Amino acid sequence: MAITKRNAARLDNLMETWDPALRRAFMESVYNMRDAAQLDLIIRFLEQADIESALRAVNLDPVLWLPWDKGIRATFEAAGEATAAVVPVIDLAGGFRTEFIFNVRNPAAETWLSTRSSMEIVEILADQRTMIREYLTTGMAAGNNPRTVALDLVGRISADTGRREGGVIGLTQSQMQWVVNYEEELRSDNPLAALSRALRDRRFDSVVRRAAAEDTAIPEAQINAMVRTYTNRAMRYRAETIARTEALTSLHEGQRQALQQAMAAGINPGSVRYIWRTAGDNRVRDSHAEMEGEVRPEGEPFISGDGNYLEYPGDPKAPPEETINCRCWLEPDIDFLASLEGEPPPETDQIDAN
């Protein structure tokens, strides 16, 4: 008897909880960065054309990403515990039986968590430094007011939330450029170009069309409002993308580590296999749609339609085009009757005979 879809550790179900949880953890870390930025110092150094000192005043400290670190750990542990719940009881010599419990303190689990979390944060902060340096340099080269540049970086305090909103800090370098390009289009002789932006707030479209029809500039206050809204939407997109990717990775790694611990405890590796499942809609990558229902035994990777090897959906060793925004998941399948190594206990033979 094998694990069925009904009682399996369904990672697609876990995603419903941990994807939004990681989005919140990411945004909390971004808010930490905004709050830690020393605005007055940033403005002062920009007035002195000292970009590097202004960058240091942003205060990109890894400790500000503690919510993200905790989120990754909690997601990983949830998958391990869910997988452990469907591992069969292990019969030991002398008639003893033991129920498998996932150990998040296992050395392999600890090593993966420590390495994954630290690498993620290092990569995020490295990208932030590059993005912020470019943003400040470009803004000052354009002759913009230092205070405006600094506020556009860290955001302005919202009367609704009491937190800094509308700043580019937290976006990737390419996403920051989306914001810059959007604003340039709104200020250009052809503002209609801005209507091609997927993240724009369509409630402003009539303003853009009227300005184009009348050949007049969009009022400054409206441009600022449109750019702030666009930036907030870009930030939500950033949070959704990185949270989904990291949730997928952490959940599958937690699943994998739990099953490896179970095999170390006595589950027969030959009884464990994995089934690739997709979201089953037209948004699934062609290379992954071909993998729907494919089965691989423990230790054998899947091969995508593009020829890339993946241990699981979101495998960080796979190319980004295989993992970003992936919605696939693995269904673990354990043959309960083959799960224990060696001969079955005598009482089981007797029951079978009857």
Image: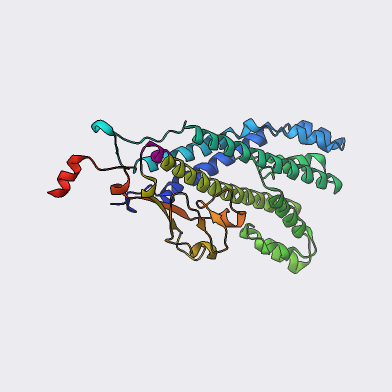
Q: Residue at x 54, y 34 (%)?
A: 111
Farthest residue, direction left: 354
Residue 285 appears in the figure: no
Measuring from the top left, give residue 317's x and y in whole percent. 59, 49
Coordinates of residue 100 in the picture (x, y in percent): 35, 36
Please give the name of the residue rendered at 53% of the width and 34% of the height, measured from the top-left corner. Answer: 70
Look at the image and give the residue range highlighted in magenta. Answer: 261-267
Picture residue at 73% right of the left edge, 42% below the top? 153
- Decide which of 279, 142 is in the foreground and name it: 279
Relative horizontal placement of residue 265, taking residue 161 as reference (left or right): left
Residue 205 is drawn in which quadrant?
bottom right
Residue 260 in the figure: left or right of residue 175: left
- The question of residue 70 being in magenta is answered with no
Residue 265 on the magenta span: yes
Residue 51, compared with residue 184, is above or below; it is above
Would you say 21 lies left or right of 202 here? left
Count of numbered tags? 0
Of all residues, the one furthest to the front in this rendering is 343
Colouring rule applied to residues:
rainbow
In-front residue for pair 209/149: 149
Residue 188 sits above or below residue 78 on the image: below
Give the overall secondary structure of the magenta segment.
helix
Q: In x, y percent, where is residue 187? A: 78, 58
Which quadrant of the structure image shows residue 196?
Answer: bottom right
Residue 176 on image: x %, y %: 71, 50
Residue 209 visible in the current orientation: yes
Residue at left 75%, top 66%? 212
89 and 139: which is toward the camera: 89
Residue 168 drawn above or below residue 206: above
